[in-house]
Amino acid sequence: MDFRDKTILIVDDDRIIAMAEASFLIKNGYNALTAGTGEEVFEILDSGADCHMVLLDIDLGNGMSGPEIAEKILKRRDIPIVFVTSHIEGDMTEQVKHIKKYGYVVKNSGDFVILSAIEMAFELFYERNRAVEAGSMDVWT
């Protein structure tokens, strides 16, 4: 299944990283939007923008954290979230352990890793929704 042409919202407080990631995704057939804060995320989502996935930095500096944003997004939309971070410590993964997510990627893991994570997240999301619609699965929490 081909998921290119889907729109991915990149949330990172480092604008240069967000723009570079958006450019990379566009070159690989995806559409990309960027946000640097929780407020910007919800402005984009509330505007009705067609958004199919969120790549969300866990550590966004001041303001809402990545896990807080993820929880609020999931209350509004059923959308795959892939967490991205530069931290490899276990306490970072603990922060998102209870949140429904479709992956976790360490920044600068390489192009293949991020593209694979995105594709796998879309596939898991699609298959989960198909199973729920078919009645063979209740709800994945």
Image (cartoon, helix red, strand yellow):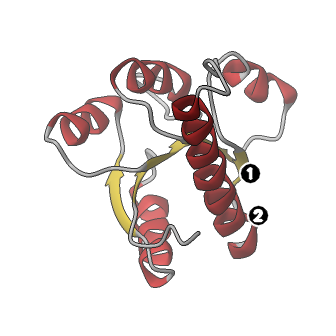
- In the image, taking residue 41 as reference, residue 102 lies left or right, namely right
Characterize the local packing of mark 1: few (<14), some (14-19) or many (20 or more) Cα atoms within 10 angstroms. some
Q: Residue at x 75, y 66 (%)?
A: 113
- Kindly identify which residue carries mark 1: 106
Q: Residue at x 63, y 54 (%)?
A: 123
Choose top left, top right, bottom left or bottom right for residue 108.
bottom right
Give the residue type that dot 2 points to. Answer: Ser
Q: Is residue 78 above or below residue 112?
A: above
Quadrant showing the C terminus: top right
Whether residue 11 is visible: no
Q: Is residue 75 above or below residue 23?
A: above
Whether residue 36 is visible: yes
Q: Residue at x 26, y 32 (%)?
A: 42
- Whole-percent x and y of residue 129? 54, 38
- Whole-percent x and y of residue 36? 36, 44
**Residue most extreme to the left:** 47
**Residue most extreme to the bottom:** 27
Do the residues bearing badges 1 and 2 touch, measured as CB atoms within 8 Å? Answer: yes
Quadrant showing the N terminus: bottom right
Choose top left, top right, bottom left or bottom right for residue 93.
top right
Q: Helix, strand, or loop for circle 2?
A: loop
- Kindly identify which residue carries mark 2: 109
Q: Helix, strand, or loop for circle 1?
A: strand
- Whole-percent x and y of residue 13? 43, 44
